[in-house]
Image (cartoon, rainbow, N blue to C red):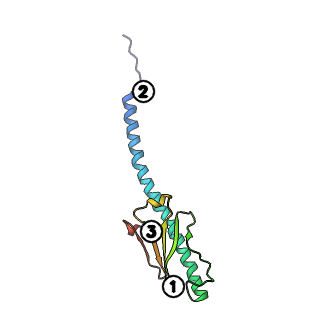
Amino acid sequence: MNSRNISGFTLIELMIVLAIVSIITAVSMGFYGDYVTRANRTDARIALTETSASLEKCKGLYANYNSVNCNVAFPVTSDNGLYSIVATAITGATFTLTATPVAGKRQATDADCTSLTLTHTGIEGGTGADVSSCW
């Protein structure tokens, strides 16, 4: 009787490992996508803050936010091109800036924060399913 010790993996063992790796990959990709969406909101926050600072500078120089001498032309596109910033309410003494995702970009599917807002008093807000996570 000739007995050999054959070592290795059976096809069943390889298929089980492949199934486990596939499940872990599928779960982690969902978490990664959510992380990227949350991280990309920084693009909107930066653009809102920079635009607000430009308007504050304008008010300091010309005594109102909507002076023709201001160098703020709406809509403003965020640095990464993910958000468009508009002034939804701008007067000589007040403003409200709104950042909305650009259509066709990843952020357009962000249901938690469909828009972010910033007012002249620094009040941060937004719209969506989970506004508390926007800022």
User: What is the quadrant of residue 111 in the picture?
Assistant: bottom left
Q: How far apart are labels 2 and 3 at the CA level? A: 55 Å
Q: Which of the two labelled residues, at mark 1 and mark 2, occupies the earlier sequence position? A: 2
Q: Residue furthest bottom?
A: 63
Amino acid type at circle 2 is Gly
Per the rendering, the mark at residue 8 is 2
- For the N terminus, the quadrant is top left
Tell me which numbered mark, 2 or 3, is placed earlier along the sequence: 2
Locate residue 7, reporting x and y percent: 42, 24
Q: Is residue 48 left or right of residue 112?
A: right
Q: In x, y percent, where is residue 43?
A: 52, 66
Q: Is residue 29 above or below residue 75?
A: above
Instruction: Tell which of 73 and 22 is nearer to you.
Output: 73
Q: Nearer the viewer, residue 109 or 134?
A: 109
Residue 2, compared with residue 112, is above or below; it is: above
- Residue at 39% x, 12% y is 2
Label 1 sits on a secondary structure element that is: loop
Furthest residue toward top: 1
The secondary structure type at the circle numbered 3 is: strand
Label 3 belongs to which residue? Answer: 115
Between 30 and 98, the one nearer to me in the picture: 98
Query: In whole angstroms, how far apart are the C-alphas of marks 3 and 1?
Result: 21 Å
Q: Would you name the residue on which mark 1 appears?
A: 91
Q: Position of residue 31 (x, y in %)?
A: 41, 54
Write the residue at 42% across / 71% down. 126
Compare residues 12 and 82 and report the one nearer the observer: 82
Amino acid on which disc 1 is placed: Thr
Judge the density around disc 2: few (<14), some (14-19), many (≥20) Cα neighbours within 10 Å: few
Q: Nearer the viewer, mark 3 or mark 1?
A: 1
